[in-house]
Image (spheres, rainbow, N blue to C red):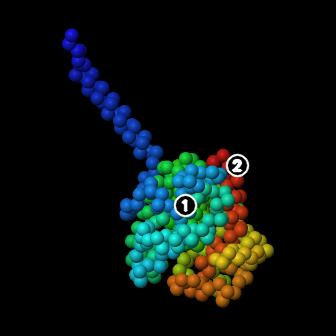
Amino acid sequence: MRKRSLPLNCLHIVRLVAFLLAAVLLISSCSNKIAPKAKNASKLDYSKQSLWAYLGDNGGTESKAADCFLICPTVYIGRGRADNMSVNDPGVKRSFTAALNAQKGIYSDCCTMYAPFYSQASIEVYSLKDSEAGQFFDIAYADIENAFLYYMQNYNHGRPLILAGFSQGADMCIRLLKDHGDDPKVRKVLVACYAIGWRLTDEDVSKYPHLKTCQGESDTGVIIVYDCEAEDVKTSLIVPEGTKTRSVNPLNWKTDSTPADKSLNKGSIMEDGSETANLTGCYIDPVRGTLKVTDVARGDYPPGPSCFAEGEYHIYDFRFFYRNLKENVAVRLKAFEGQEGSIV
């Protein structure tokens, strides 16, 4: 018996329906992913565990109330010139992990930790003009964006998220939020971004109005940002003269210049592990927007790398207020959970 064939017009309809169905499935598949926006495509494959300093508790499993995606500060000295770190250098990776470990305790009580190795810009890059330095930071950011999108696609699973970084890591956090902070998938899970030791200007917020700066101790979906300096400092590497940054005071959680007494400081932890309560108070400079530290002597807290001048307390940004930051992470997470995942 001969098989009956479909009329030509019916065959066209079947093919059209199949084509439309395939298109819908493709669009649906793409819509579940956050598209990268970095200028340069990262060549790193973040499905490899070797590219993560922290990868959950066991290869991406989670056991705590939230996740923290933590971005390392600058540890790469370079080779006597401006360049980017190799993620295959064992010595640099050890320094990288040590720098993460120094701040991990702020977040790890509440959060399962994720931290990618990335081709960070060397300390030498900070001595370049912005027009020359940009290419090195773009390379670093391409890796960070790649790692973050991989984390969101494969590990987040709708869990509350703390985004955190210090110094270059804080810069990378803010770049991520500029590009992806308005994505519904990110907004739904973002508890807060701790961008410690960087700047966020009115111009940034005007260009990216979805960036919300912290207004108190428990608001969510916001950025916590500040950089420390002595009271008489007029310019710094992080906040050059003529620039005004937004800041929050990590002792009283105010955004104006209301002073916070050192009695509010619950514990500063230095590099050697020593801890001191009530070490210093602080206030926000109404002109520069930076965080002025009031009760320490410059000679006791040298600036560290040569790119910083005396009175720039940048390397102590999270150390001076360690216990207050740690307590605040728990406060914001509790507030977030109380809203059942909604964003203020």
Q: Earlier in the sequence, mark 2 or mark 1?
A: 1
User: Label 2 vs label 1: CA separation?
Assistant: 28 Å
- Looking at the rendered image, the disc whose residue lies closer to the viewer, 2 or 1, is 1
Q: Is residue 107 left or right of residue 308?
A: right
Q: Amino acid at mark 2?
A: Gly
| Dot 1 alpha-carbon crowd within 10 angstroms: few under 14, some 14 to 19, many 20 or more | many
Picture residue at 52% right of the left edge, 71% below the top: 94
Look at the image and tell me in which quarter the N terminus lies: top left
Q: SS class of the residue under badge 2?
A: helix
Picture residue at 64% right of the left edge, 62% below the top: 107
Identify the residue at the far top of this view: 1
Residue 217 in sight here: yes
Q: Are marks 2 and 1 in contact (CB under 8 Å)?
A: no
Q: SS class of the residue under badge 1?
A: strand
Find residue 282 and name its label: none
Picture residue at 44% right of the left edge, 45% below the top: 31
Find residue 338 and name its label: 2
Q: Amino acid at mark 1?
A: Tyr
Which residue is at the front of the view, 136 or 205?
Answer: 136
Which residue is at the front of the view, 270 or 257?
Answer: 270
Residue 290 in sight here: no
Q: Is residue 30 above or below residue 8?
A: below
Looking at the picture, how far across and down is residue 24, in whole percent? 39, 37
Q: Name the image quarter holding residue 249.
A: bottom right
| Dot 2 alpha-carbon crowd within 10 angstroms: few under 14, some 14 to 19, many 20 or more | few
Q: Is residue 126 above or below residue 331?
A: below
Picture residue at 53% right of the left edge, 65% below the top: 71
Find residue 54 and name its label: 1
Identify the residue at the far bottom of this view: 299
Looking at the picture, how far across and down is residue 298, in whole percent? 66, 87
Looking at the picture, how far across and down is residue 172, in whole percent? 50, 66
